[in-house]
Amino acid sequence: MKITDAKVFITSPGRNFITLKIYTDEGIYGLGDATLNGRELAVVSYLQEHVVPCLIGRDAFQVEDIWQYLYRGAYWRRGPVTMSAIAAVDMALWDIKGKALNTPVYNLLGGKSRSGVMVYGHANGETLEETVDEVGRYLDMGYVAVRAQSGIPGLKGVYGVGRGKLFYEPAEKGLPPEQTWSTEKYLNFAPKLFKKIRETHGDDFHLLHDCHHRLTPIEAARLGKESEPYHLFWLEDTVPAELQEGFRIIRQHTTTPLAVGEVFNTIYDMTTLFTEQLIDYIRMSVLRGGGLTHLLKVAAMASIYHIRTGFHGATDLSPITMAAALHFDLAINNFGIQEYMRHTPETDAVFPHAYTFEKGFMYPGDAPGLGVDYDEKLAEKYPYDRAYLPVNRKLDGTMFNW
Ligand code: CS2
Ligand code: MG
C-alpha cells in the first residue's frame, strides 16, 4: 500500500487545530493530529516543507521504518515541533493500518487489557468554595477522578481557572495575556482547598492537582507533605522538569504521587525519572511524544520502574489524539489514568469520532483504525486565528513559568 499524497489542514472551531491526512493508492486515508498550542504554524511548515515530500511513494505499513526515517533522518532531533510532526505521521499510519486490516488500533497494540479507560475531568472555580462545588458537579456527572484548580485570593488570572465551565482553553487571541503569581499565596492556599474538598466530598474518588511547573523542588516537597492527609492521586508538574534530578528532593520528603511530562517529547526527557523511580505517572501524550510507535517504547520502559501512564488530554489536543490515546490506554498493561478535557460541540462536529464517555470511563469504540474523521467542508468555515498561551510574572514583575 503506497502513500500517494499528504495534506495539512488548519481549522479553528474555537481554537486552532492542525490535522495531517495521508492518502494511499488503495483509497484508504489516515488522520494525525499535529497541533502545538501557540506554535501551530511551525508544525504546518515542518510537515509541508520537510516531511510530506519524503513520504510520497513509501509503504504505509512500514510504520517503524518511517518513524526512524523521520527521527534519525532529520539530523536535528527532538523538540516539540519535530516530534509533533512525527506524531501526526505516526497516528495517520496506525489509522491506515487499522482501516486496511479492518480492526480498531487497540487490537494492533495488544488488544483489550481492560473494559474501559478511567478518565479525570477538570473542576475549577474562581474561589475555593466555587471549586469545591464544581468538584461535586463532576462527581454528579459520574467522574470517579477529578482535577481541582482554583483561583487564589489576591491573584488575578491563575492557571486552570477557565472562562467557561466544562471547557478550558488557555490560549487567547492577540498577544500573550499576562498573569500574576505568588508561590507563597499558592502554598498557603492549596492544602486548604484539598482539605475542604475531602471534608465535603469524602475520600471515595481520585483527587488530582496540577502545579503547572511553578515550584522549586523543596517547595514541591512542602506541598506534597502537607497534601498527604488528603490522599491525592497525584501532584502534576510540580517543578519544571528539565532538571530531572530535582525530583530526588521531592521524593525524599513526601509519599504524595508525582506526575510529569506533558511538555516532554522523547523518552530521553525521562530516563533519570524512570531509572531512579522519581515519578509515578508519565504524561507525555501521543501528540507531543512522536506518536504511538514511540509511546510503546516509553510505556515498556516505564513498566520496569512501577511507573504508569497518565497522558495529557487537554482541549488543545484534537479528538484524533484523544482517540489514539484511548486505543493505547485500553491496550497497555501499565495504564494509570487519562486526562479528558472535553472539546466543544463545534470541535466535535469537525472531528466526528467513535469514542464515548460513560460514568467516569471512556471507550475508543470498535471502528477500524482510530475511529475519527475530519469534516473538511465544515473545517473550512473556521479559519486559523493566531493565539498565544499566557505568560506569567511574579508580583514584583519577575518573568516566571506559566
Ligand atoms: C494542563 C494543560 O491539562 C493540563 O494538565 O497542563 O491545560 C496545559 O496548560 C495546556 O495543554 C497548554 O496548552
Ligand atoms: Mg498539566
Image (tube, rainbow, N blue to C red):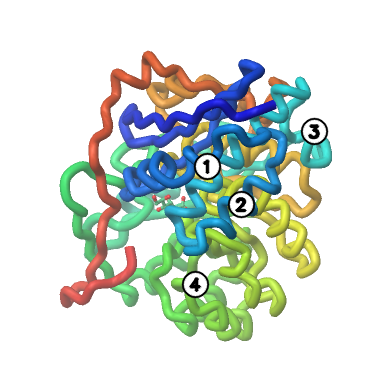
Q: CA distance from mark 4 to mark 2?
A: 28 Å
In the displayed structure image, the side of residue 154 where residue 134 appears, left or right:
right
Please, what secondary structure does the residue beneath circle 1 have? helix
Point out the tag, 1 or 4, that comes first from the N-terminus. 1
Point out the tag, 1 or 2, that comes first from the N-terminus. 1
Mark 2 or 3: in front is 2
Q: Amino acid at mark 3?
A: Asn
Q: Where does the image place residue 47, in percent across and percent down from the top left? A: 43, 42
Q: Quadrant of residue 358?
A: top right
Q: Is residue 319 above or below residue 310?
A: above
Q: Quadrant of residue 227?
A: bottom right
Please, what secondary structure does the residue beneath circle 2 have? helix
Residue occupying the far front of the picture = 57
Q: CA distance from mark 1 to mark 3?
A: 29 Å
- 131, 339: nearer the viewer: 339
- Which disc number belongs to residue 69? 2
Work out whether residue 133 can be spotted. no
Give the class, few, some or many, for how many residues have Cα within 10 Å of label 3's Cα (few <14, many ≥20). some
In the displayed structure image, the side of residue 141 where residue 94 appears, left or right:
right
Residue that mark 1 sits on: 54
Residue that mark 3 sits on: 107
Residue that mark 4 sits on: 241
- 54, 182: nearer the viewer: 54
Q: Amino acid at mark 2?
A: Tyr
